[in-house]
Image: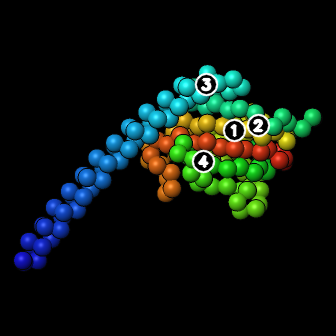
Amino acid sequence: YSMEESQSIMNEYQQKRYESYEAEMAELREKNLAAAESFLQTNKKRSGVVSISDKLQYEVLREPTEGGKSATNKSTVTVDYRLITLSGEVQDSSYERGKSSVFDLSTNIIEGFRTAVSVMHEGEKIRAWVHPDLGYGINGSSNIEPNQLLIFDIELISVDK
């Protein structure tokens, strides 16, 4: 093949691979979104589940410390947390790292996480279910699939401001 022919063949191959990848991602987005919305519809009917909106639910796993400070969207907080996908796969965990995490809730963090923490008080532990629109959305991240429901176990250790 000439250089031009080789380049043309390579471009055609890359275009077909890209189209195939895009079709797979579109199917995965639809499948994950349907699973997330179905789960949230069923989950909101369970006793003890609080719906902040149709895209964020939580249940209290441990009541807060008496007199514990509450967080706001502008607080800096120390938390322990575990991020789990609907399939049960742990994606991130401060427990596994053995070190609590500190977050400034006014910075660029997942909206669903920020909102869940902002309804908590020190000492409280919750499980929150986050719709993809309040999570990583249609693109996902390096380890979160597109439109994947996120499940957070969050323990609010302290509110620093």
Q: Which residue is mark 3?
A: 44
Please state if 27 lies on the left or on the right of 11 as rendered: right
| Disc 1 from disc 3: Cα separation | 13 Å
Q: Which residue is mark 4?
A: 84
| Disc 1 from disc 4: Cα separation | 10 Å
Q: Amino acid at mark 1?
A: Arg
Q: Secondary structure at mark 3?
A: loop
Other-residue count near label 1 (Cα within 10 Å), few / some / many at <14 / 14–19 / ≥20: many
| Disc 4 from disc 2: Cα separation | 16 Å
Q: Amino acid at mark 4?
A: Ile
Whichever of callouts 2 and 3 sits on the residue coming sooner in the sequence is: 3
| Disc 2 from disc 1: Cα separation | 7 Å
Other-residue count near label 2 (Cα within 10 Å), few / some / many at <14 / 14–19 / ≥20: some
Residue situated furthest right in the rendering: 67
State the mark number for residue 61: 2
The location of residue 130, given as percent across then percent down, is: 59, 37
Q: Amino acid at mark 3?
A: Lys
Q: Who's the residue at 72% across and 44% down the image? A: 154
Whichever of callouts 2 and 1 sits on the residue coming sooner in the sequence is: 2
Q: Determine whether 115 is above or below 18 in the image.
A: above
Q: Which residue is mark 1?
A: 127
Q: Who's the residue at 56% across and 51% down the image? A: 89
CB atoms at circles 2 and 1 under 8 Å apart?
yes
Q: Who's the residue at 64% across and 24% down the image? A: 46
Q: Secondary structure at mark 4?
A: strand
Q: Determine whether 121 is above or below 41 in the image.
A: below
Q: Secondary structure at mark 2?
A: strand
